[in-house]
């Protein structure tokens, strides 16, 4: 059922008085007078409600002698139920991610009881990617390509600096994916420094998310190793946390899920982008 058909149907069913009439008609077709009596309402008002339901396609009517008898159109309700089922199915994936993050958030907030609470925490990611190491390397170091994948699903890069040389500067600012005009507050910002650069083999850098007040939440030490395979490139990513503050719990809770989503986007970008595509920095 298209949305332009769902909206008037939902509007018609939203009124408690009309919903009562629908439940009465679900039992059997009934005339207006009987419906008004059973619903404990005045007949003129009941007639108006029934006319609204009929315009929305929920009920149908026909004259029988001096009476107008209304009946429920079950097909409309089944169509609406199917539309709601599809909507619920669509929401299952994002809601599962939201619930998973919420559970991790509660756990990390309880653990963040003193400075350094997450120091030494490590995270490991492995992805088998399409393309040779040189192509994967470009997606790891060129800002135009980094911007395509270097955020979780619900965010977008709004500012990005990545200087792929030892001592090079890193700036990553991101916003909500739907905030295309920059009207909402920045969702997050991180700053860092490149440590080691071995093109096509290894990339290491430090990256620190910033707290709302501008201080560092923690410092993440990332080591990315590329290994050629017969079908592409294996990418090993190792995270290690130092300098964690009490206020960093929200950031730590999102690492495994958020960076995992980012790497999935990287894999998708390498799959869909032609091998000879070149970007501009």
Image (cartoon, rainbow, N blue to C red):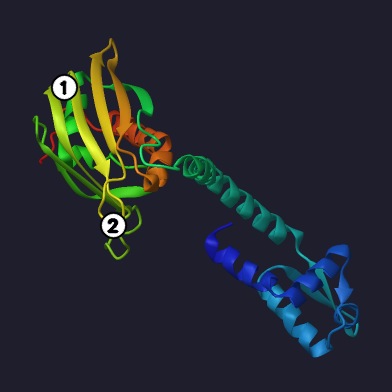
Label 2 environment density (alpha carbons within 10 Å; few <14, some 14–19, many ≥20): few
The residue that appears at 89% across and 65% down in the rendered structure is 28
Q: At numbered mark 1, what does the secondary structure look like: helix, strand or loop?
A: helix
Image x and y of residue 225, in percent: 24, 20
The residue that appears at 62% across and 54% down in the rendered structure is 84
- Residue 277, can we see it? no
What residue would you read off at disc 1? 134
The residue that appears at 67% across and 54% down in the rendered structure is 81
Please report contact status of discs 2 and 1: CB closer than 8 Å, yes or no. Answer: no
Quadrant containing the C terminus is top left
Say which of marks 2 and 1 sits in front: 2
Quadrant containing the N terminus is bottom right
Q: Is residue 110 above or below residue 69?
A: above
- Residue sitting at the far top: 230
Image x and y of residue 255, in percent: 38, 37
Horizontal side of residue 64 vs 104, given as left or right: right
Q: State the residue in front, 250 or 36.
A: 250
Quadrant hosting residue 190: top left
What residue would you read off at disc 2? 213
Q: Tell me which numbered mark, 2 or 1, is placed earlier along the sequence.
A: 1
Image x and y of residue 105, in percent: 48, 44
Horizontal side of residue 113 vs 64, given as left or right: left
- Residue 255, can we see it? yes
């Amino acid at each position: 059922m298209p949305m332009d058909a769902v909206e008037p149907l939902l509007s018609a069913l939203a009124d408690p008085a009309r919903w009562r009439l629908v439940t009465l008609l679900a039992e059997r077709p009934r005339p207006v007078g009987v419906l008004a009596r059973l619903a404990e309402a005045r007949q003129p008002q009941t007639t108006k409600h029934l006319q609204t339901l009929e315009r929305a396609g929920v009920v149908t009517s026909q004259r029988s002698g001096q009476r107008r008898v209304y009946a429920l159109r079950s097909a409309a309700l089944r169509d609406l139920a199917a539309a709601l089922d599809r909507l619920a199915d669509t929401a299952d994936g994002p809601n599962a991610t939201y619930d998973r993050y919420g559970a991790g958030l509660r756990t990390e907030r309880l653990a963040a009881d003193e400075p350094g609470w997450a120091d030494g925490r490590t995270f490991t990611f492995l992805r088998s990617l399409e393309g040779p190491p040189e192509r994967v390397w470009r997606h790891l170091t060129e800002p135009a390509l980094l911007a395509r994948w270097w955020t979780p699903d619900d965010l977008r890069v709004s500012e990005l600096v990545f200087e792929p040389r030892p001592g090079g500067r890193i700036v990553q600012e991101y916003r909500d994916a739907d905030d295309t005009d920059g009207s909402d507050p920045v969702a997050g910002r991180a700053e860092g420094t490149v440590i080691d650069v071995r093109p096509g083999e290894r990339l290491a850098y430090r990256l620190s998310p910033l707290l709302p007040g501008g201080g560092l939440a923690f410092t993440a030490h990332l080591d990315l190793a590329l290994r050629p395979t017969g079908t592409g490139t294996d990418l090993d990513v190792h995270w290690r946390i130092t300098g964690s503050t009490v206020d960093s719990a929200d950031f730590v809770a999102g690492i495994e899920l958020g960076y995992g989503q980012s790497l999935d986007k990287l894999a998708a970008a390498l799959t869909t982008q032609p091998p000879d595509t070149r970007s501009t920095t």
